[in-house]
Image: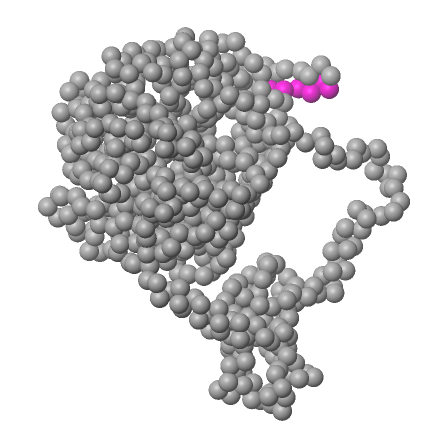
Amino acid sequence: MENASLVELVPERSLLDPNFAGYKLSLDPIPLYLSSSPSKVDHVLRSEEQYSLQHVKLFGLQNHLFYDPWSANDVYFVDEKWMIQRNVLNQETGRLTGLTKVWEIPSNNVRRPGHYNPSASFPGQDLVLLSDGAGTLHLVKSGDRQKTRNSGCEGSSWQLLLSEEVCGPEVPFVLAHSLVEDREVSELGDAAGGRKVHCLLLHVEEAKQVKGQRSIPSCEGAGLNKSRATAFVTVIEWITLHEGKDCSWTVERIRKLCGSAIPDYVTIEAGGTGIVISSEQPFIFIEDTEKPLEKEEEVKESKGEEKADDCAEIDVKWQQDAEEIRLSVPLTKGEESIKLSELNVSVVDEKKVCVKNGEHTVLEGVTLHPVDHDLTTWELKDNVLHVCFHKLQEGQMWNKLFTEGPKCSEEIDPKLREEIHSRLSHLTSETMDPSVGSVPVFNSEELEECDEAPSNAASLCRFDGEEHVATHKACISSNQWLFNVQMGSGIPQAICLRHGPDGLLWQPVKSNNPQSRDESSSEQTYWSCSHVASFVSFGYVQASKQRKKFIACAPDASYVAVCEASQYVYVYRQPAQLAGDGQLRNRRTGQQISRVARQQLISLPSSQEILGVHASVTALYILVEDKLLAYMVNQ
């Protein structure tokens, strides 16, 4: 990921509330509708061989309740007989229609120890992807689920299109995300043939059993210490299904990524050109059935390193300011007698820099960001070639000069150093400023456990499906992952990260901003994250819930729910205007408050383990062993 463009997550100020007055406990009752299931939920537990941390996280955080983004208030789950149960909310009456059996998953394999829990995903309005947890992926045509949602015999319209063990014979997996590829970004030949469905399958395997076109990285190479080495790795299989002209579906392409941790967040970007992963450990591509990862690439990389090492013998130094890059290249002994007229400095494609003395290459490299060729100047002084590049993006400070080429040491510009010292002089003064007053000194011992940042270098990375590399990277080591939410149909999932005391919701999007362009690959690759919603002080709130198991958020971000392992659910709503234009007054400060954020506590009627949760705009669904509860939070 060394050449990945760094993306900064910049919060939108208009979505922050510096005057937030806290959550007020509300005792208003929440209507409850309950649907009993004749069969229990298919809940699979870990076997004795599934003892790794990846297995614990994969099984412990499995959500057994599946949400249909194309039909906002419909949820599904799989019972122990492998029947898919659907619950529908009647839009006219506001009541639940009860559980309906819509389809039975074919029993290709008998349930045995080592299998996973069933999972489902809804890539299109008429398509459903199902995993039986035993290694088989099913693609089902359901018809328009919105039109048939109130009919009692809709299950008869579900038709099996594809059933295949895509990860290998009886290799279980979990469906992480899926979507239908946008035809506008498809190739012309694909548009005539039919649709494409992209899906991400996740499973944990022993490292020695994972085979690919590239070798699995070692513990040190993957960012792990030897003391934390594990015999298990996480495999993400990116499966592409293609619809032929005869409406038959086939597996067109399989791409594999491997890492040493369970990702907190994994999603497919719109168009199916890349995926986004958030994890404490890095992931790499290890296989692609359509565009093989040739071993010669490693040879080319080693040759490139040897070439870079040859250039690294030159002591190249550089300086920068807001507008320019100044490069100093000392010439070797064999070039002492050369003249300035014999030297040539060229910039190709705004990034490829080449310094030549006739036919001999003195220096060659690829800059981190583009420079202006027309404004490039150079001079020869005291046997040192001084080159001045003009930045195309003025004001952007570079953290290194070359992504490919010799290693260069940066020298801080004296003017820039003086400016930095002047700005920080008030922090290094030996005398107290009387105008500041008695400001308490920060004490690290006052930090609580919830304030600690992850010890590993967690990141949010965008991977390109054709280049097989991470093109963009956002460092989130100081931002705790909170939850994921599907905010609409046919789009990537959003991720909620903790920023200070708040929880901020980020939506990966394709951007038209040239500054977010991937500088190391195609000029058409743009990517960024947009701040779409905030939950003020939710970072501190969720940290206090030691028994939390699930966190669910409504697609419109109107509320967020924290579910414990059993019995209790906490609902936190966005600030709302008081009824009748009323106001509250703070007794200590006298501050008038017209908007109040409410907090509600839900005590479930039973102490059974919570197996699944989904927050829709209207209802909060809670799934236990044999019941589905719907709390009408916004009726």
Please, is residue 505 above or below residue 591 in the view?
below
Would residue 513 be seen by someone viewing this image from the given angle?
no
Residue drawn 66% across the image and 19% down it: 592
Residue drawn 78% across the image and 35% down it: 441
- Read off the magenta span: 589-595
Residue in front for this viewpoint, 49 or 360: 49
Please, is residue 341 above or below residue 244 in the view?
below
Please, is residue 585 above or below residue 244 in the view?
above
Residue drawn 25% across the image and 50% down it: 253
Residue in front for this viewpoint, 392 or 562: 562
Residue drawn 40% across the image and 37% down it: 493
Percent position of residue 508, x then y: 43, 43
Q: Is residue 481 magenta?
A: no
Percent position of residue 359, x then y: 48, 87
Colour basis: one colour
The answer to which image quadrant residue 622 occupies is top left
Q: Residue furthest left?
A: 246
Percent position of residue 577, x then y: 54, 20
Would residue 292 be seen by someone viewing this image from the given angle?
yes
Percent position of residue 204, x then y: 36, 39
The answer to which image quadrant residue 379 occupies is bottom right
Please, is residue 171 above or below residue 450 in the view?
below
